[in-house]
Image (cartoon, helix red, strand yellow):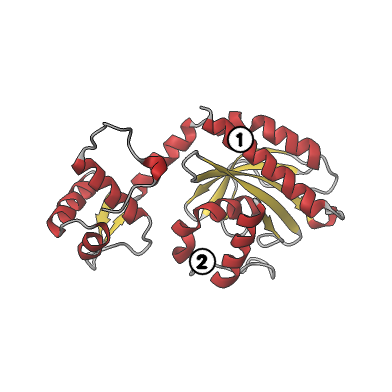
Amino acid sequence: MPDTPPDQQPPAGLKLDSTLSKGLVILEALAAAPGGLGVTELSRDLSLTKSTVFRLLQTLCAMGFARSTQDRRYEATLKTWQVGRRVVDNLNLRDLAADAMQMLSRESLETVYLGVPEGFSVIYIDKIDSQQPIRSWNPVGGAAPIQCVGTGKAILSVNYSQYRNALASRLTAYTDRSITSLAKLDADLQLAQKNGFAFDRGEFREGVIGFGAPICLPQGQAVAALGISMPEVNLRDGDLARLGKIVRQAADTVCARLASR
């Protein structure tokens, strides 16, 4: 089996349940493979016998966490996502992010969003309305393609390996600024990783730009993002760096609160 990351290794003296750990490793592999995986692939990649892989796949299927496809491959089901969403809901992100959102609202005077990933979309679970006469607007519960807006791209900048291959067929042009090639998306997200925030140049709605920074668990996975959305006409000289900096600082504050729970 592959090495466990240092920050996920069990405490000294704790003996792992072998069957459970192997089943979870298989489930993680399926969740990261958009096209599904076969028994042979899983056996080779995870250094497990085919009989063990097959037996554990049958258990995962019986419990609803995986399903077999017509071409004898296996893929994770949405039950895995549902469990993850319950965990995210229990994090109480709205309360944890409330002060950071208020800071962003004061400093930017623009619309502030808290978004979480749902499939290939980002869903807005909280917002503070803009104080500007010309403003952007999206309701709580509204959605946007994850690769097109600041909050979604911020999440992608951390979790990109889980999404990249599957996004290849989803790079739709919503505006003339939408990113429609993986090579350009790769470059854009590399810049977001370097800067600590993502920037939407009007890639989902004409004339509406946005900034986003990821909210991460201590293990490193992005579970949400804070963002600022605004009409491009409101952008002033120096705002690109200034707004990117404050959204990154706000998200870092929420990350620290998550780590201290």
Q: CA distance from mark 2 to mark 1?
A: 30 Å
Residue pictured at 24% horizontal, 47% vertical: 23
Q: Secondary structure at mark 2?
A: loop
Type of the residue with mark 1 = Val
Please name the amino acid that badge 2 sits on. Answer: Arg
Q: Which mark is residue 170?
A: 2
Compared with 71, 238 (above or below) is: above
For the image, the number of numbered tags is: 2
Asked if residue 157 can be seen in this view, the reply is yes
Front position in the image: 69 or 183: 183
Q: Looking at the image, which residue is at 25% across and 43% down?
A: 21
In the rendering, which numbered label is found on residue 254?
1
Q: Residue at the left extreme?
A: 51
Q: Residue at x 62, y 50 (%)?
A: 151
Q: Quadrant of residue 40?
A: bottom left
Circle 1 crowding by C-alpha within 10 Å: few under 14, some 14–19, many from 20 = many
Q: Residues within 10 Å of mark 2 (few under 14, many from 20)?
A: few
> With 119 as the anchor, is 205 left or right in this view?
right
**Mark 2 and 1 residues: CB-CB less than 8 Å, in contact?**
no
Q: Residue 222: percent from the left, percent from the top?
A: 52, 46
Quick one: label 2 or label 1, which is nearer the N terminus? 2
221 relative to 181, above or below: above
Give residue 207's position: percent from left, percent from top. 76, 60
Where residue 208 sits: x, y (%)?
Answer: 74, 56
Q: Of the residues tagged 2 and 1, which is closer to the observer?
A: 1
